[in-house]
Image (tube, coloured by chain):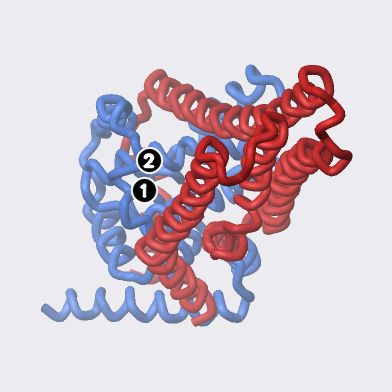
Chain colours: A blue, B red
Amino acid sequence: MHANDRDRIFGDWLASHKGILFKVVHAYAFEHADRQDLFQEIVIQVWHSVEAFRGESSVPTWLYRVALNTAIAWTRKQDRHQRGKQPLAMVEALLMTPASDTPDPRVEWLYLQIAQLKDVDRSVALLLLDGFSYKEIAAIVGITESNVGVKINRIKSALAGKRAEETES
Amino acid sequence: MNLDDLMEVWQSQDAAPLHGVNEALVRLALRQDEAKQQKRQRIGRWIFYVTAAFMVAAMARLLFVMIYSHDGDALSGWDYAIPVVGAAAALLWFRMVSVRNRAQAEREQRFGDSLRDQINRQLAQLDYGAMTSRLGNLLGTLLLPIVCAFAIVLGKWRITGRSFSDVWVSVPIVFMIGWAIICVGGTFWWSRRVVQRKTLPRKIQLEALLKELDG
C-alpha cells in the first residue's frame, strides 16, 4: 500500500470514527495523562492496522477490535509510564483536545458503571451499547455467542441493579 | 431506563464526541513512532549481520594467513580445518538465529484479530522470550560464536608454532574460556531475572484475562 493511500485512509477513519476511540479510551483510562497515553497508543495501532484491513468486516468493527485489543494490553502493562515515550510528552498532552460541550451526565453515569466492570466485560458492554450483535461481539472478543449472552445478562443485571439502587436512595 | 434508552444515550456521543483530535500532532506522533521502530529494527539487524560477517571475515583471514603467509610444511590438513570449522560455525549460527526469528514471526502471525488471539499472541511472545533465556538455548545460541573465537586462538597458536605452555598462547585461551563463562553465566542470570520480574507476572495476568474471557 502506498504511503499516501495509508495516510488518506487513516485520516478518513479518524474523521469518521474518532468517537469509537474516545469511548474505548474513557472506558479503560481514568486520569487525564493516562487517557492521552492510551489514545496515542490506540492511534498508533490503528495506523499500523490500516495495511492489514482487508474489508472483511466494517470499519467500526475493525476499529473496535484494534482499540479494545490495545486498551486491554495497555491496562495490563505494569510499566506503561516507562516506555521511552518521554520525547512525546508535550505532544501527548495535546493529541486529544477537550470538547466544547459539557458531557451528558447520563453518559458520565454509564462510564462510571462500565469502569466498575472487569476488563473483558467492559469490552462487551461497549460493543453492546453500540449496537453490535452477539455474533459480532463474539468475533471481536474471541468467545462463543453463548458466553457473550452470559456476560451480557450479567452486565444488564449490574446496570439495572445500580439504577434501582440509585433510584431508591 | 431500559437497555434501548441506555443505548440511545450512549450513541449520542457519536453525534457529539467527547473530544476533538489535533490531527497534525497525531501525525507527528505517528512519524516519531515509526522512525523509532525502524531505528530499533535497523540497529538489531545490523548488529546481527556485522557480528556474523566479522566472524566469517576473521576465519577467512586466518585461512589466508595459514596458506600464504606461513611455511606450509609445519601445518597439517587438520590445522587448515580450524578456520573452516570456525566459518561453518559462524554461518550455522547466522542461519539458526534467522530461522528461529522467522519461525517466531510466522507463529505470531498465525493468530487472528480477536481479543483472545491478541492475548494468545502476547503469550507466545512471552514464551519465546522465556524460552530463549533458558540455559540450554542460551548455550546453543552462544556456543557457535564461542567456537569461532576458539578457532581464532587455536589457529593463531598453530601459525606461530608456539607450545601450549607458552604464556602468550595459554593466557589468551584461559582468558577466552573465562570470558565465555562470564558471558553465558551473566546472560543467563540477567535473563532469569527479567523472566522472574517481568515475564512471569505478565504471563499470569494474561492467563487470568483468558480465564476471564471464558468466565
Image spot of residue B201 (x, y percent)? 38, 68
> To which chain does the residue with label 1 belong?
A
User: Is residue B209 toward the left or the right of residue A94 in the image?
Assistant: right
Query: Disc 2 on helix, strand or loop?
Result: helix
Image position of B178 (left or right of B80): left
Badge 1 crowding class, 10 Å Cα cut-off, few under 14, some 14 to 19, many 20 or more, is many
Q: Residues within 10 Å of mark 2 (few under 14, many from 20)?
A: many
Residue A144 is situated, as x and y percent measured from the top left of the image, at: 63, 75
Task: State the residue at coordinates (36%, 24%).
Answer: B22
Vertical comparison of A109 with A87: above or below: below
What's the distance in space between the residues labelled 2 and 1, CA to CA?
6 Å
Instruction: Please indicate whether residue B118 sits to the left or right of residue B199 in the image.
Output: right
Dot 2 or dot 1, earlier in sequence: 1
Task: Report x, y in % for residue B84.
Answer: 81, 38
The residue indicated by pointer 2 is A39
Identity of the residue drawn at 41% across and 26% down = B29
Toward the viewer: A132 or B3? A132
What residue type is disc 1 on?
Val
